């Protein structure tokens, strides 16, 4: 209500306080905004002057103010308080593009036996359920609906499923909307399931004749933490997990750890559908019916590796085979396939993420989805072997999630990420943390370089070559302070490391001498044009020469990154096929 463009002008701030304001104020691209979570109080407050249809200028308003500590954090100025205003809330949801709602401060209303909610306005004798174009110059009479208060202490509540039913009625899933329709409180209710016969009869008894209208087909996805080692689950295994018959992941081919089930709250249509159509009974007694928010469920499962979740999220491209196993199978038809220097027209069959067949005409008997490419080009995904995704430590710049999505959008389906994040990936623990983060958020294939320093050779040697793309050695100083300039350390690395060694080659002694020279001329403010003279061609050649010499001497697999001078090219032979080369480089 305080947005300069969409608020109750002139009683507004001088800025855009709606979601779109993050795009103009912070430079966030609109396409980077996914879910918009709206947080609202169980009642209403307002700062300063301006229209406030549900304001309480009595002892009730004062009670809410005191219980809710509704005073300015800096000024201590009392905030205006009132009952919840649903037309205003609907307007805020629309303007901000809210996809999920979270209510706060419900405990402030603990002591009320009856709570009022404004559902409509009366303006000029007309009853409306929306915020008028100009609310400042009209007389607004709020229309209230009285609801039962929860009249209970919520301060020790940890699980929404344990909340009083009166509180659950304030919000929830399909069950809440249907309940309002049955009780003739609303004209239309969204539901993720068909109304039951029992609910239909209850509605008719209240003078309501529900008419189901299907507007979209939905699906329910079952999600596990990727570290559990679960490739697929049958419908029957899902049923036995949710009912409590299967209690350990080892029973379905995973690791030996107990199963914890997370799901939607008691009012959720998704939960009700699973209970009635899959389980034919209730959920296991230990399952956690936490919240109406899919995102909160997902975050919970990411944090604890033995948890399992179900949620509803649009159509899920999976089919079920004769053994009730969920599979992802696609037949790509009529493609122009570009691969290994050739181009051919044909089909590609993909099963569970693996290309199983390529041919002019491919026929498949198993259940699958057909995608007709109509002559579009089909290329292998590219691999980027040197990326900096800034996670952990610099996530205000970029994250594994954001950059993997950018990569895939550009045709990069696999990436190898460098170790100079914050902190540097110089230990097995820090390296493992990056893999864990990627397993949770990356949509591309991923691998990470182990970082080397002058004093972590023992950690480098602990690295399993099958788990990393290589070890990164900064032979010249660069971002991250991971310089390796010790002759002893370099010798140990090239003689002992079984994996690929990727180097950043600039001779540190030469760089420092050049830097000192130009500081003597220009002082501390050396012009940026001197950069290529400080990190000179000679510095590059000297360092690359040393790396090649060590690799040849010890038979190490060496890859020099970002070669930048003509002279360095003379260090490399081009007489062997690529697959036989042990020393390679890239510009």
Image (cartoon, helix red, strand yellow):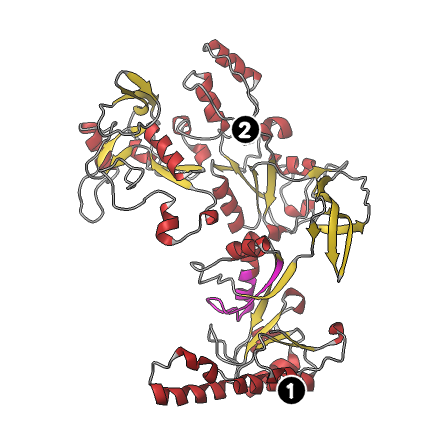
Residue 432 part of the magenta segment: yes
Check the image and report above or below for 270 versus 204.
Answer: below
Look at the numbered disc 1 and give the secondary structure of its residue.
helix
Is there CB contact under 8 Å for labels 2 and 1? no
In the rendered image, the residue lying farthest to the front is 375
In the rendered image, the quadrant that contains the C terminus is bottom right
Which circle's residue, 2 or 1, is located before the other in the chain? 2
Horizontal side, residue 493 vs residue 33: left or right: right
Which mark, by number, is residue 192?
2
Horizontal side, residue 68 vs residue 323: left or right: left
Estimate the x, y position of residue 577 in percent, counting from the top left. Answer: 76, 74
- Which residue is drawn at the image coordinates 75% and 72% (left, top)? 579
Q: Which quarter of the picture shows residue 546? A: bottom right
- Which residue is drawn at the image coordinates 49% and 57% (left, top)? 399
Q: Nearer the viewer, residue 18 or 503?
A: 18
Estimate the x, y position of residue 234 in percent, counting from the top left. Answer: 70, 39
Residue 482 part of the magenta segment: no
Look at the numbered disc 2 and give the secondary structure of its residue.
loop
The span picked out in magenta is 413-434
**Gap in angstroms between the C-alphas marked 2 and 1:** 66 Å
Estimate the x, y position of residue 288 in percent, counting from the top left. Answer: 51, 38
Q: Nearer the viewer, residue 490 or 529?
A: 529
Per the image, the residue denoted by label 1 is 549
Asked whether residue 280 is in view, the answer is: no
Check the image and report above or below for 156 versus 139.
Answer: below
């Amino acid at each position: 209500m305080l947005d300069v463009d969409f608020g109750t002008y002139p009683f507004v701030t001088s800025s855009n306080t709606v979601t779109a304001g993050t795009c103009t104020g912070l430079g966030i691209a609109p396409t980077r905004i996914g879910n918009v979570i709206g947080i609202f109080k169980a009642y209403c407050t307002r700062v300063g002057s301006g229209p406030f249809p549900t304001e309480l200028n009595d002892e009730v308003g004062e009670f809410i103010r005191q219980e809710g500590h509704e005073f300015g954090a800096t000024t201590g100025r009392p905030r205006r308080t009132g009952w919840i205003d649903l037309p205003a809330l609907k307007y805020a949801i629309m303007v901000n593009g809210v996809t999920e709602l979270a209510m706060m401060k419900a405990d402030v209303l603990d002591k009320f036996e009856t709570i009022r909610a404004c559902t409509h306005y009366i303006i000029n004798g007309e009853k409306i359920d929306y915020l008028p174009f100009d609310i400042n110059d009209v007389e607004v009479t709020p229309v209230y609906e009285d609801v039962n208060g929860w009249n209970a202490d919520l301060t020790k509540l940890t699980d929404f499923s344990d909340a009083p039913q009166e509180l659950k009625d304030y919000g929830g899933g399909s069950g809440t909307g249907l309940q309002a329709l049955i009780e003739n409180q609303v004209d239309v209710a969204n539901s993720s399931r068909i109304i039951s016969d029992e609910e239909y009869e209850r509605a008719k008894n209240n003078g309501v004749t529900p008419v189901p209208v299907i507007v979209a087909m939905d699906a329910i996805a079952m999600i596990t933490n990727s570290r559990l080692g679960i490739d697929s689950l049958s419908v029957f295994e899902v049923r036995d997990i949710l009912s409590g018959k299967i209690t350990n992941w080892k029973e379905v081919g995973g690791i030996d750890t107990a199963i914890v089930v997370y799901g939607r709250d008691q009012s959720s249509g998704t939960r009700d559908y699973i209970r009635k159509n899959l389980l034919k009974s209730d959920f296991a007694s230990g399952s956690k019916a936490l919240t109406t928010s899919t995102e909160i469920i997902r975050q919970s499962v990411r944090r604890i590796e033995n948890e399992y979740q179900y949620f509803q999220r649009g159509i899920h491209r999976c089919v079920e085979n004769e053994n009730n196993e969920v599979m992802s199978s696609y037949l790509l038809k009529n493609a122009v396939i570009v691969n290994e220097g050739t181009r051919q027209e044909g089909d590609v069959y993909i099963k569970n993420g693996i290309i199983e067949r390529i041919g002019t005409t491919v026929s498949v008997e198993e259940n699958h989805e057909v995608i007709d490419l109509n002559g579009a080009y089909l290329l292998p995904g590219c691999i980027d072997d040197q990326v900096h995704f800034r996670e952990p430590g610099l996530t205000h710049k970029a994250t594994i999630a954001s950059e993997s999505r950018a990569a895939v959008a550009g045709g990069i389906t696999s990436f190898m990420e460098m170790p100079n994040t914050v902190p540097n990936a110089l230990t097995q623990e820090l390296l493992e943390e990056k893999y864990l983060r990627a397993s949770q958020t990356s949509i591309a294939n991923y691998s990470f370089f182990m970082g080397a320093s002058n004093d972590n050779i023992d950690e480098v040697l602990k690295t399993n070559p099958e788990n990393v793309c290589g070890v990164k050695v900064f032979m010249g100083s660069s971002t991250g302070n991971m310089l390796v300039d010790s002759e002893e350390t370099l010798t140990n690395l090239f003689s002992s490391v079984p994996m690929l060694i990727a180097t950043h080659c600039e001779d540190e002694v030469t760089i420092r001498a050049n830097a000192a020279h130009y500081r003597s001329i220009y002082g501390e403010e050396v012009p940026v044009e001197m950069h290529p003279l400080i990190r000179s061609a000679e510095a590059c050649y000297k360092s690359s020469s040393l790396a090649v010499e060590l690799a040849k001497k010890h038979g190490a697999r060496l890859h020099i990154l970002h070669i930048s001078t003509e002279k360095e090219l003379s260090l490399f032979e081009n007489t062997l096929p690529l697959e036989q080369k042990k020393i390679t480089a890239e510009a």
